[in-house]
Image (tube, helix red, strand yellow):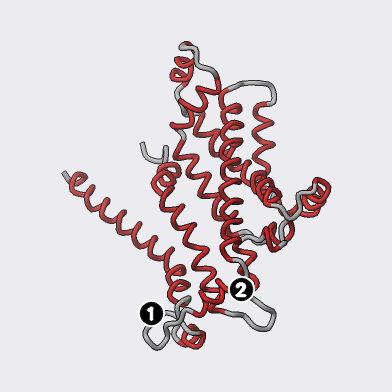
Amino acid sequence: MNSARANPINTFAMHGALILYTLIALFPVFVILINSFKTRKMIFREPLALPDAESFSMVGYQTVMKQGDFFLYFQNSFLVTVGSLTLILLFGAMAAFALSEYRFRGNMLMGLYLALGIMIPIRIGTVAILEMMVSTGLVNTLWALILVYTAQGLPLAVFILSEFMRQVSDDLKNAGRIDGLSEYTIFFKLVLPLVRPAMATVAVFNMIPIWNDLWFPLILAPAEETKTLTLGSQVFIGQFVTDWNAVLSALSLAILPVLVLYTIFSRQLIRGITSGAVK
């Protein structure tokens, strides 16, 4: 009886905690957004106050639209992020399926080798990567960023997806083979739909670092036509003078796509993280 009464209370407490954590996480976004609509003086005088008739200003957004090609930067970031995530999920899922499904000599060593990418930052090899891109003629192209981010995200993708694919029923896959399905059909039609929460988790974990990265766009694609949104926003940050209105406006516009994508993947993300935690 006591446990039956406690369940609604526990559920209410969990929902309350979730709402509280969400509000805490969104508070910095809220501060950036409201200050992007203020004058420079009011940003520093009352950073937590909502914009009113006296403090409201669109000068930051006007500056962003006039200085630099913001829509081109946005397009470049979108293409790099979507292209990288597509390759990470495709090749990561294929490698995870091979490691979890087929037993061969060196299977464990191969998995450990791929997992090393999680522990060793790819930025350590920046000089070698730059030399490679120069020799292949990929400097100042979006493909340079897509390939680097794909290599960066594959270790984590293989590590997460292989664990989930080991939980897929062997009877289901063997039944498909008995029915004459090819390995590709089994992979795309039977296995992938069952690991969608894990794929959403991998996508979210890789999406934010790729979208917000400044290091590789600055080194591999600094040209005006290949600038990403994060790199393009740096034009408003100087050594002695910073246009805070423009910076906050650019950050507000850059945050929106991430919030939209996170909202789309949030349910699958939570399922992927909590899968197997509660029996």
Kindly identify the amino acid type of the residue bearing the numbered disc 2: Gln
Q: Quadrant for the N terminus, please.
A: top left
Is residue 255 depicted above or below 91 in this figure? below
| Residue to which mark 1 is pinned | 50
Q: Position of residue 175 (x, y in %)?
A: 45, 15
Label disc, if present, on residue 262 of the rendered structure: none
Label 2 secondary element:
loop
Is residue 57 depicted above or below 12 in this figure? below
The residue depicted at 46 percent of the width and 34 percent of the height is 195
Q: Position of residue 125 (x, y in %)?
A: 76, 51
The residue depicted at 42 percent of the width and 43 percent of the height is 268
29 sits to left or right of 233: left
Q: Quadrant of residue 99?
A: top right
241 sits to left or right of 271: right
Is residue 276 depicted above or below 254 in this figure? above
Residue 76 or 3: which is nearer the viewer? 76
| Residue to which mark 2 is pinned | 67
Q: Position of residue 73 (x, y in %)?
A: 60, 61
129 sits to left or right of 84: right
The residue depicted at 23 percent of the width and 47 percent of the height is 7
136 sits to left or right of 180: right
Kindly identify the amino acid type of the residue bearing the numbered disc 1: Leu
The residue mark sitting in front, 2 or 1, is 2
